[in-house]
Amino acid sequence: MIVAASANDSTALMYQIPYYTEPTRGLIPQYDNKFNLGSWEPWLTYDSVATGDRLDKPTLIVHSEAAAVPQGTHAFLARLHGDASEIWLDGVTQFDFYDNPQHVTRAADAVAAHFERINRGS
């Protein structure tokens, strides 16, 4: 285990990285601020794009070109079969999806509408 985020400890995984080192955002007291190095390789080598080939349930992706790995999201969407939809929010960063009330609400409302549509069977 190592320190996950720090503004002062250069050995931290996320050293001086905005959001993760901000006590009002990612570095809140409830976060244990630890990273297990044993989880690193499986996380980096997991092929989430390939799972798109196996999905057969209605799928909604809410993402942004300004968020993490948009090219991976496009590749994943290209592999989906059947009922797949996407919503792209302009200028929304990865961190905005975590704690910006406006963008979290937009994404959550889209997901709620998706499930309402699926549950109605249309």
Image (tube, rainbow, N blue to C red):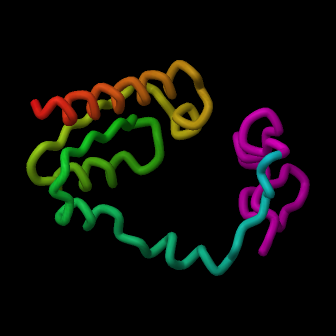
Picture residue at 52% right of the left edge, 34% below the top = 97
**Farthest-out residue, right:** 8
x%, y% of residue 19?
Answer: 70, 40
Give the dominant element type of the magenta stretch: helix, strand or loop.
loop
Q: Is residue 62 left or right of residue 54?
A: right
How many badges with numbers are in the image?
0
Which quadrant of the structure image shows residue 62? top left
Picture residue at 32% right of the left edge, 49% below the top = 73
Q: Is residue 59 left or right of residue 67?
A: left
Q: Is residue 18 visible?
A: no
x%, y% of residue 111?
Answer: 35, 32
x%, y% of residue 91?
Answer: 45, 26
x%, y% of residue 98?
Answer: 58, 37
Quarter of the C terminus within the rendering: top left
**Farthest-out residue, front:** 120
Q: Is residue 72 visible?
A: yes
Residue 3 sits inside the magenta stretch: yes
106 or 37: nearer the eye?
106
76 or 9: nearer the eye?
76
Picture residue at 33% right of the left edge, 54% below the top = 72
In the rendered view, tell whether residue 92 sits above or below residue 83: above
Quarter of the N terminus within the rendering: bottom right
Q: Is residue 15 left or right of residue 106?
A: right
Residue 80 sits inside the magenta stretch: no
Q: Is residue 4 left or right of residue 120?
A: right
Magenta segment boundaries in residue numbering: 1-29
In the rendered view, tell whether residue 53 sits above or below residue 108: below
In the rendered view, tell whether residue 80 sits above or below residue 60: below
